[in-house]
Amino acid sequence: MSTHTSRLDRVRDADHGLKLVGSVGGVAIAAALVAFLVAPALTLYPLLAFVAVVGYGWVRYQESTARFLMFLTTVSTVIILGLITVYLLIRSLPAFGELGIDMFTGTEFGAAGYSLVPMIWGTLLTTLIAMLIAGPLGIAGALFLAEIAPGWVRELLKPAVEVLAGIPSIVYGFLGLVVLSQYLFDQFDMPVFGSLLAVGLVVGVMALPTVISVAEDAITSVPDSMKDGSLALGATDWQTIKSVTVPTSFSGVSAAVILGVGRAVGETMAATVILANIADLPDPLYDVFGNTVTLTSLIASQYGNASGLQMSVLFAAGVVLFVTVMTLSIGSQYVEIRMERKLGGRQ
């Protein structure tokens, strides 16, 4: 009886702590947000109140405080995403209102008009080139790490992949400019320095760690019983990989490639460093040796000098990027869910 009573007391204490920390802490953080938007000089005071409440709650009601903080971080993520979306839309409304469909039908960016078509085309070409590099090589690398490589090789290569992901994009861009672009310029006698091909190759290498990591997770999640069953029936290791592992993990591998595409679409610094500021369609359109800017490099290179309608057009380019990357992310989540259902035997 006493054990049951003490358990009820702990539950009541936790509920009381959650209400106390949640209400006071929530009011404090909301006041800090309002102060930041209205009177930035006063932001410190509600923040200090929030820290004090959380500190007291952590000492007195640790479990309830931890739950509140986890809830707060989740809600904050959604709120921040919503604020970014609203801000982008508001700043881009003048461009959509004045130019409308012309932003997606014209071919010139400048005094004659503000068309995003050349930048969208440049982004598409560089993304296709990048995924021709990152897709096959990333999937092959993931298969090697997950199914073929000995343990000691895997222990060496996995940290190397993580280091590759941690290299700043400006370093990739600088190497692409001084090494790859110089090589292409000398060997192919190009009229301008830098090209969409160079950007695509560099971004493809940058997207490799993402594809390898996510695809490896998908491959290693295939149940051992499925692979053991194939081997028991007399299939070789390669036949098992080809006929069991790859088809079963296809959804997860697809998600890895989609995330890699998102990485390529959103890359800014490498494209900005390598490409010249030329806002024209390549001639012919498939000329990967052309120097058309991408959406990201357009924003990075012209934001400092833009104003009025041109600034609004740059925000419209940001909206296009935002919607594209969000769609890719949702698509990757969808295929991952399908993979989990498939491996779990659910439809």
Image: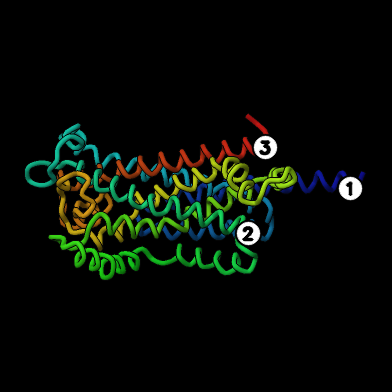
Q: Position of residue 44 (x, y in %)?
A: 43, 60
The residue labelled by disc 3 is 344
Disc marking residue 315: none
Q: Amino acid at mark 1?
A: Thr
Q: Amino acid at mark 3?
A: Gly
Instruction: Give left or right: position of 326 versus 231.
Output: left
- Residue found 61% across the figure and 39% down from its top: 340
Q: Position of residue 261 (x, y in %)?
A: 40, 47
- Residue 22 visible within the image: no
Please tell me how crowded label 2 is: few (under 14), some (14-19), or many (20+) other residues with Cα within 10 Å: some
Disc marking residue 3: 1
Closer to the camera in the image, 279 or 95:
279
Instruction: Give left or right: position of 325 versus 114.
Output: right
Please tell me how crowded label 1 is: few (under 14), some (14-19), or many (20+) other residues with Cα within 10 Å: few
- Tell me the mark number nearer the camera, choosing from 2 and 1: 1
How many angstroms separate mark 3 from mark 1 (CA)? 39 Å
Q: Secondary structure at mark 1?
A: helix
The residue labelled by disc 2 is 56
- Residue found 50% across the figure and 63% down from its top: 161
Q: Position of residue 199 (x, y in %)?
A: 29, 57
Classify the position of the C terminus by image quarter. Answer: top right
Q: Amino acid at mark 2?
A: Tyr
How many angstroms separate mark 2 from mark 3 (CA)? 44 Å
- Residue found 49% across the figure and 44% down from its top: 255
